[in-house]
Image (spheres, rainbow, N blue to C red):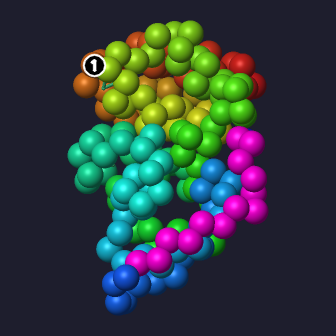
């Protein structure tokens, strides 16, 4: 958990007709929004709330750079309509650290040098958090299988798999 207050309420009012009301908690902060129905969760995060950790790579569910947790489960934010997250909890990479203390997965990525350019890294980290929570980090092969939706153009896969394995051990 981060140290953001859980009572913050952010209002974003769209001037367009046909908007739908959406209340969503993102990284522990409640947001009351009026959104056009076609807005994706990724665009809500990046373009409206300025949470740019989740990256827009393919924008069609193929690369995993936009991975966030929705009620604790991994999703590609580019494939989720923001209107469908009403009443739900979203966690992005910005919400992982506890103040200055990094999440064990973040720490493991640093210790194992599990990135080069870093573009895929927020998605890799969020996917790794989900992968470990799902119990799919028992071996190198299992990690590679269950992280296969997250592509890395720098091909840092050995280091990423090692970091996930180390974090899984640390988290227990
Ligand atoms: S940007 Fe969402 S999967 Fe590629
Ligand atoms: S570190 Fe460059 S794409 Fe993964």
Q: Is residue 129 above or below residue 116?
A: below
Given residues 167 and 122, the one toward you in this image is 122
| Left or right position of 45 against 96 | left
Residue at image position (31%, 26%) is 152
Q: Is residue 54 above or below residue 44?
A: above
| Left or right position of 21 against 54 | right
Q: Is residue 11 magenta?
A: yes
Residue 138 shows up from this direction: no
Given residues 140 and 60, the one toward you in this image is 60
Question: What stretch of residues is rendered in magenta?
Answer: 2-14
The residue at which mark 1 appears reads as: 154
Q: Is residue 169 above or below residue 34?
A: above
| Left or right position of 47 against 171 | left
Q: Is residue 171 magenta?
A: no
**Residue 164 in the image: x percent, y percent?**
55, 22
**Residue 126 in the image: x percent, y percent?**
52, 38
- Magenta highlight: main SS: loop
**Residue 56 in the image: x percent, y percent?**
31, 46
- Quarter of the figure with the N terminus: top right
Given residues 56 and 133, the one toward you in this image is 56
Picture quadrant of residue 93: top right
Picture quadrant of residue 2: top right
Residue at image position (45%, 16%) is 114
Residue 40 shows up from this direction: yes
Given residues 27 and 166, the one toward you in this image is 27
């Amino acid at each position: 958990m981060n140290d953001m207050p859980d009572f913050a309420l952010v209002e974003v009012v769209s001037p367009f007709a046909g908007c739908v009301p959406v209340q969503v908690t993102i990284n522990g902060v409640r947001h009351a929004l009026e959104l056009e129905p076609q807005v994706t969760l990724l665009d809500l995060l990046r373009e409206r709330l300025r949470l740019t950790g989740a990256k827009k790579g393919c924008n069609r569910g193929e690369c995993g750079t936009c991975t966030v947790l929705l009620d604790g489960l991994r999703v590609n934010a580019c494939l989720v309509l923001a209107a469908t997250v009403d009443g739900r909890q979203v966690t992005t990479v910005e919400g992982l650290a506890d103040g200055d203390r990094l999440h064990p997965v973040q720490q493991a990525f640093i210790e194992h040098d599990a990135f080069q350019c870093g573009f895929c890294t927020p998605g890799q980290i969020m996917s790794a958090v989900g992968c470990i929570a799902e119990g799919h980090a028992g071996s190198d092969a299992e990690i590679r299988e269950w992280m296969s939706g997250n592509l890395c153009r720098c091909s840092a896969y050995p280091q990423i798999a090692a970091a996930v394995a180390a974090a899984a051990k640390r988290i227990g």
